[in-house]
Amino acid sequence: MENTKRIVPDLGVGMGLRVPHYAHILEHNPEMAFFEAISENFLVDGGKPLYHLDRISEKYPLILHGVSLNIGGADELNEDYLKRLKELVRRVKPAWISDHFCWCGVGGAHLHDLLPLPFTEEVVSLVAERAHRIQDYLEVPFALENTSSYLDYRHNTMTEWQFVSEVVERAQVGLMFDVNNVYVSAYNHGFDAFDFVRSVPHERIFQIHMAGHTNRGTHIIDTHGGAPIDPVLDLYRTTVELSGAVSTLLEWDDEIPGYDTVASEVVRISQIRDDALRRRAGKSESQRMATAKALSLIPERAGVTLDGHGWVQGGPRESAGADHGVSA
Amino acid sequence: MTSRQQRAQAEVGKNPSLRELQTWMVERLQHDRDLAKTDDFVAESERVLTGNDGLLPVETLEIYREQYWLRHTGALLDDFPGLSGILGQKDWERLVQGYLGAHSPGSFTLRDLGAALPGHIEQATYLPHHSLCVDMARLEWAYVDVFDALDTTRSLDADRLGAMTEADWETAQVMFAPAATLLKTRFSVAPLRRQLKRSAAIVDDGGKAPDVPLPKRQNAYMLLYRDRQRNLNYAEQSRGAFALLGHLMNGDALVPACGLAGKDVPSEAKDIPGKVGDWFAHWGKLGVIVDVVGR
């Protein structure tokens, strides 16, 4: 599969598919542009997870988002994982799939975390070669997401946005652009979030992620708890102005509220997106750059109190322990 | 030297290869104490990580170490609510720390995290209610396997069953749903698990002993299965029915399986042939038997 610059459709604004919302979705068929499911929760043989996924994919566009690929791990890629993922792709038929710029383990260990990669030429080559190969193997457009991070390596030789841009261009894959992650990493590492937003190849953005986070003063944890705060929404507005109509998804994984609460945030993001697209239509490139620079001066809104240390992306798994069978 | 001791020697220089860096980090993130309290960890973190205005390099690494433990402890708690309910918070945390220290997560999915826990608990004789814990862990891991086992597309054809002759049953093979398994325990742990889940007497109750009375030793013979709504369930079996199910699941035809079950449970041997019809009806109703095929 060659040259995957924005070959994916714009699905609008959707929300992450989470277990606490299954019953509401299946019973009420609420209006939603699309859902995104965490791939690993459905790499199983059968039972409730796949039953629910099938029912929902019959009614809504569904995208798959992975957290365990370990594309930047020093070990070889896990062939069993990729084989199962390909089976799931054939079952769901998503318009694209994604995973993260990260590593998850080495030497046979898997830590189930999105650990930051060193931004070096060695790692650019490794990840780009693998991303290209994975996209060909899965036979579906593939995107990688910029992660939030809490540590920085001394031997980095480039910025994160240089690293991300180089990989997606060299691999000819998409960018899953997580605007909240840009904000979190900018806060933690002291760079200007708008430099990141302005510098990535906008035509390669397949999808945008939005989420809340937890500010601990000295650092921000990417908990996916709560709604996106205003400065993240400002970054999003600029991203849309630079990128055009890109599918956007709200993730909410910590202290997940009822469906309607999340859906109302989706509506708010849709309104911002519509506004940004209108501005894009009436603005020159130089005007957009000026706006981006001005917005970088807005401080973070105070009062974020949610805390979800140790969260699992995708929220709770549908598991045997949580099964609400009559007798078990 | 154990693999764990070997890993403990991992060091990292100023410009490490990707494998050197990741090996060092995996070892540090799996450490069971605050990294910032060990001088060596502080020094090596400064060699590799930058830190920032608010945090020392080792403190940025510590964020990931905390998440490692919380994430995996939480995943085990999800899959073993009965076990954690028996133990209470303090003993549960001790168990999980020992387990994760001995069994580094290796699967891409958290679903597999507890696979070795039943075996680990057998060796953890320091645990209170040790035998009961062993049984509960075996039950809860069996439930994990039943929960997402393959769905079946077969369905039992009552007309075809009714037309089968005695000779057919000599050789016919009974087919079971993949989401069905047998478990013999020394305690009646399935009802206990249900009670513990309902009472929420689990680890976040402040570490107090669970309110639910623990059962006395009494063998239980259980058929674990997924019902037609895909919910987990169990059905206690008589010893004879359990023995017969075991042979049928091994692929023995009905008539020879009845003979083998009678040998396993001599006290019920003469009753088994007369009860088979009712047992079959019961298993069929549960959705556990999905077909009978001739050979």
Image (spheres, rainbow, N blue to C red):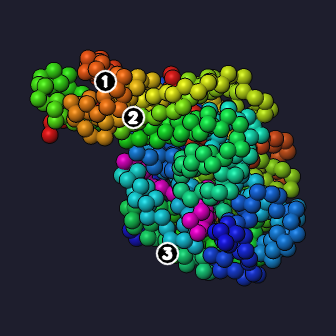
Mark 3 residue type: Glu
Residue at mark 1: B269
Image point (69%, 80%), residue name: B16
Task: Assign the N terminus of chain A to one quadrant of the image.
Answer: bottom left
Image point (76%, 57%), residue name: B32
Mark 2 residue type: Ala
N-terminal of the pair, mark 1 or mark 2, is: 2
Span highlighted in magenta in the image: A91-113
Label 3 neighbour load within 10 Å: few <14, some 14-19, many 20+: some
In the rendered image, residue A99, in percent from the top left (x then y), is placed at: 54, 58
**A6 relative to A91 in the view: left or right:** right
Residue at mark 2: B180
Main SS type for the magenta part? loop
Residue A225: tell me if it is visible: no
Q: Chain of mark 3?
A: A
In the rendered image, residue B212, in percent from the top left (x then y), is placed at: 68, 22
**Numbered tag placed on residue A129 in the rendering:** 3
Label 2 neighbour load within 10 Å: few <14, some 14-19, many 20+: many
